[in-house]
Each structure stands twice: as C-alpha cells, then as structure tokens.
C-alpha cells in the first residue's frame, strides 16, 4: 500500500498487517498524480489518498491499482483515525482499477 503525500505519515503505523510505504519513502515526492499513479501501479496494489480530485483529474481506466479515497473534515491524523479500519477492509475485497 502506498500513502499519498497528502496523507499523514503517522497513518502508516495504524495499518497493521499491510506493507505500507509513503510517497516520500519511495523518493517520489513532488511527482504529479498521473505519473505517480502509473509508478504506484508498477509496485503497489493499493494507493491511499485524501485527494478528492484524483478521480476526476486522472484517467484511471486500465490502471492496475486500487485507489482508496479517505474523506474526512481535514487530513489531520485525528480526523482520519476513525476511518483507518476502512482501508484495511477495502484491501481485503478490492477491485483493481476501481476508484473507491
């Protein structure tokens, strides 16, 4: 699972049972969403973001990557924490190439 730059790194520690990396750890900071998603699809099964525009800004058809969009009041870890079980549940029943 790859955490987008806009997702707090602390969330990584709250997703037990998954191999989680951040965009920064991969050395991909600053890469625009299109190229970033293509790179992610080569090395990851799941991309976790809070960027609500990603679905509309990018052509996701044929992308071999599940994209999980976490929607909260802010991207602060305290706002995202109540949602942290949802990515785990979705990873277990994901459909590759679908926006969620």
Image (spheres, helix red, strand yellow):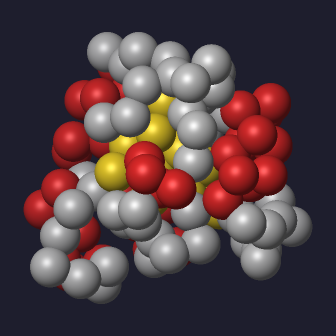
Observer-nearest of 4 and 85: 4
Q: Residue at x 24, y 82 (%)?
A: 74
Observer-nearest of 22 and 6: 6
Across and down, in percent, residue 14 comes to 36, 58
> Is 64 left, or right, of 7 in this rendering?
right
Q: Quadrant of residue 85?
A: top left
User: Quarter of the image containing the N terminus?
Assistant: top right
Across and down, in percent, residue 92 comes to 34, 19
Q: Quadrant of residue 95?
A: top left
- Image height of 27 relative to 91, above or below: below
Extreme-right residue of the structure? 27
- Image height of 47 relative to 74, above or below: above
Q: Residue at x 52, y 56 (%)?
A: 57
- Image height of 8 relative to 39, above or below: below
User: Quarter of the image containing the C terminus?
Assistant: top left
Q: Quadrant of residue 91?
A: top left
Q: Residue at x 30, y 84 (%)?
A: 76
Observer-nearest of 66 and 33: 33
> Is 67 left, or right, of 72 in this rendering?
right
């Amino acid at each position: 699972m790859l955490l987008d730059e806009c997702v707090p790194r602390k969330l990584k520690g709250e997703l037990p049972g998954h191999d989680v990396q951040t965009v920064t750890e991969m050395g991909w900071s600053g890469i625009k969403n299109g190229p970033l998603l293509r790179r992610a699809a080569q090395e990851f099964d799941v991309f976790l973001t809070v960027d609500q525009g990603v679905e509309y800004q990018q052509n996701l058809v044929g992308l071999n990557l599940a994209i999980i969009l976490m929607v909260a009041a802010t991207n602060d870890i305290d706002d995202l924490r109540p949602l942290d079980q949802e990515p785990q549940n979705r990873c277990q029943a994901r459909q590759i190439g679908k926006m969620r």
